[in-house]
């Protein structure tokens, strides 16, 4: 029995999806704090238990135990307080997948400060925007020269940013050497009580959404987020106590919260981290071989690239369970990965605003291309424009409602673990997406007769052609079946007769070159594998697709170029 997990879940094992959906419960203590109640508790119970296994492109391997995480985060908490950071202050961390990110996130939770994890790909303009709108008081980054210069330039325009620190071997004199400060700090740190302690409904974490339109929104989470990710880790990713789980993501993305800290540590799994600046198939394959995770999760992009590689020389037998999230995985990629490696990829769906909302949970047969069935945490449904549930086969807005097995009460406080509290400092946009107890995600899908959800696309991405509604994903899935296609994005292009037509922007696989003959071949291919009216009337071959810093395809950028 996992002593930590059982404190929050009175029932851990279920016989079927129906049993899981109807009977899963989560205890939410009113003063729950992940750093104390999970990380430090593992350190007390089993201080040598592995918490982190990290590698990078040099092949170096690092391990940290829970005992070491507790010691270093206690020292870091003392450093933060000494620098004037207090409960409620906002601190941005740009730390890639260095051990510093786990140490400092845990330390910030201990003092009740609000953490903004951010990606190293931020420009100076991005940093200025985030620091000013979020009132960031302290920023800690890696020692990458370009990043430090961007921060230095941004700081001139950020009046509230009073502390700059960096982690690494080359720390400029105008930055605090955070590792050195932690090494020299006092090791004793006592959990604050009373007003100094944290409550479940207080702010803990902010993610800037990587939306494909508009300025990024501040997604605010409280301390229940960690408990919401029990379902993510235990029942979708199927992480195991004393084994390694590896989710491939930068620490600046919300996928980090999904796969590299909260649910995994609650379940007693070690986190596997591959720290790289640029994805390559060879790099991820080498990292997998060194880390040897029992469970593995990656964005669809990773799997799309892997099927173009010769995987016959790799042994994947150590991977017992594989999952994908971030963007839908086409059936073609699913079947190819299974054929080449034996891995059955189980899709999950969610947002920066949530923990896993729907998934091909371990009891369910996989329907390639489907996101699976709803998680028990939320009353998930598909609603029409009037807010009524859609019948099977009808496309609508994926929505979280107050209905279903989703409300957990602790001492009179109703909470929904894993659901954000709103878009910070933007009441208007919060009310637009979340009102009358319903959160409309803006993602469109339909439900089949078995209760499986099928993703169509963001509401803004659905193509309306001659009265038809065409989802980009279904056309992209058809194109991915053709061996010439490495990556693709389907968008709407204006048309005077039809209103809109389907446009495909395609990155070709090695060995293929753009031509009018290939365009015609791809158009005919789509006509054969899906409804003929869905074929792309416009095809544009490019070297790479525009993507957000979280790796999602920016279809709005492609539309603007049309």
Image (spheres, rainbow, N blue to C red):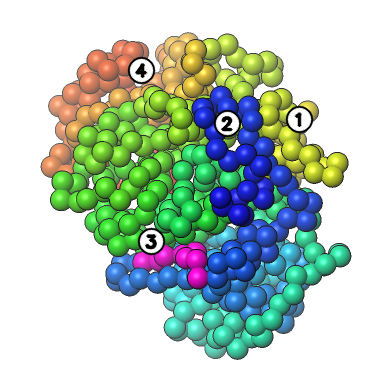
Q: Which mark is residue 235?
A: none
Kindly state the secondary structure of the residue where label 3 is placed: strand
Question: How many numbered marks does the figure carry?
Answer: 4
Q: Quadrant of the C terminus?
A: top left
Q: Quadrant of residue 170?
A: bottom left
Q: Earlier in the sequence, mark 1 or mark 2?
A: 2
Q: Quadrant of residue 427?
A: top right
C-alpha separation, residue under disc 2 versus residue under disc 3: 32 Å
User: Magenta residues, as a range?
Assistant: 48-55
Q: Which mark is residue 534?
A: 4
Q: Earlier in the sequence, mark 4 or mark 3?
A: 3
Residue carrying label 2: 20
Residue 430 image offset from top left, x and y in percent: 72, 39
Q: Nearer the viewer, mark 4 or mark 1?
A: 1
C-alpha separation, residue under disc 4 versus residue under disc 3: 39 Å
Q: Nearer the viewer, mark 1 or mark 2?
A: 2
Residue carrying label 1: 437
**Which residue is painted at 22% across and 34% down in the image?**
339
Q: Residues within 10 Å of mark 4 (few under 14, many from 20)?
A: many
Residue carrying label 3: 274
Frontmost residue, 82 versus 342: 342
Q: Are marks 2 and 3 in contact (CB under 8 Å)?
A: no
Q: Is residue 351 visible?
A: no
Q: Earlier in the sequence, mark 4 or mark 2?
A: 2
Q: Nearer the viewer, mark 2 or mark 3?
A: 2
**Which residue is painted at 58% across and 76% down in the image?**
72
């Amino acid at each position: 029995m996992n002593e930590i997990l059982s404190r929050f879940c009175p029932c851990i094992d279920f016989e079927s999806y129906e049993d899981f959906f109807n009977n899963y419960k989560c205890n939410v203590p009113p003063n729950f704090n992940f750093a104390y109640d999970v990380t430090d508790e593992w350190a007390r119970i089993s201080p040598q238990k592995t918490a982190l296994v990290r590698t990078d492109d040099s092949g170096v391997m690092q391990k940290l135990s829970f005992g070491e995480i507790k010691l270093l985060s206690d020292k870091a908490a003392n450093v933060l307080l000494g620098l004037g950071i207090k409960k409620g202050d906002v601190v941005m961390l740009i730390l890639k997948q260095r051990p510093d990110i786990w140490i400092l996130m845990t330390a910030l939770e201990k003092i009740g400060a609000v953490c903004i994890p951010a990606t190293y790909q931020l420009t100076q303009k991005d940093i200025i925007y985030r620091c000013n709108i979020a009132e960031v008081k302290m920023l800690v980054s890696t020692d990458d020269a370009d990043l430090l210069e961007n921060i230095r330039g941004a700081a001139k325009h950020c009046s509230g940013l009073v502390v700059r620190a960096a982690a690494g071997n080359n720390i400029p004199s105008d930055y605090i050497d955070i590792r050195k400060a932690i090494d020299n700090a006092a090791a004793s740190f006592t959990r604050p009580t009373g007003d100094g302690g944290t409550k479940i409904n207080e702010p803990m974490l902010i993610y800037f959404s990587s939306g494909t339109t508009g300025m990024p929104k501040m997604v605010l989470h409280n301390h229940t987020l960690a408990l919401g990710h029990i379902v993510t880790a235990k029942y979708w990713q199927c992480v195991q106590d004393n084994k390694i789980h590896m989710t491939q993501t930068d620490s600046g993305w919300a996928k980090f919260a999904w796969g590299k800290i909260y649910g995994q540590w609650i379940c007693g799994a070690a986190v596997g981290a591959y720290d790289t600046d640029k994805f390559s198939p060879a790099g991820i394959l080498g990292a997998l071989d060194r880390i040897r995770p029992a469970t593995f999760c990656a964005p669809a992009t990773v799997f799309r690239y892997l099927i173009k590689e010769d995987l016959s020389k790799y042994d994947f037998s150590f991977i017992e369970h594989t999952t994908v999230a971030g963007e839908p995985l086409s059936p073609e990629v699913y079947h190819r990965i299974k054929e080449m490696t034996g891995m059955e990829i189980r899709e999950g769906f969610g947002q920066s605003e949530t923990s896993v909302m729907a998934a091909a949970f371990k009891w369910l047969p996989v329907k390639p291309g489907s996101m699976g069935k709803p998680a028990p945490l939320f009353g998930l449904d598909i609603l029409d424009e009037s807010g009524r549930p859609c019948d099977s086969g009808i496309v609508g807005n994926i929505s979280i409602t107050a209905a279903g097995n989703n409300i957990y009460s602790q001492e009179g406080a109703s909470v929904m673990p894993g659901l954000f509290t709103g878009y910070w400092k933007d009441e208007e946009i919060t009310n637009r997406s979340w009102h009358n107890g319903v959160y409309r995600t803006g993602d469109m899908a339909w439900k089949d007769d078995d209760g499986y959800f099928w993703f169509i696309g963001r509401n803004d991405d659905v193509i309306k052609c001659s009265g038809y509604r065409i989802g980009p994903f279904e056309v992209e899935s058809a194109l991915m079946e053709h061996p010439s296609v490495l990556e693709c994005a389907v968008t709407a292009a204006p048309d005077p007769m039809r209103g809109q037509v389907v446009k495909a922007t395609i990155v070709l696989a090695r060995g293929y070159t753009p031509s009018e003959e290939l365009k015609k071949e791809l158009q005919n291919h789509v006509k054969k594998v899906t409804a003929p009216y869905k074929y792309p009337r416009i095809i544009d071959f490019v070297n790479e697709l525009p993507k957000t810093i979280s790796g999602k395809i920016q279809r709005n950028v492609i539309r603007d170029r049309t």
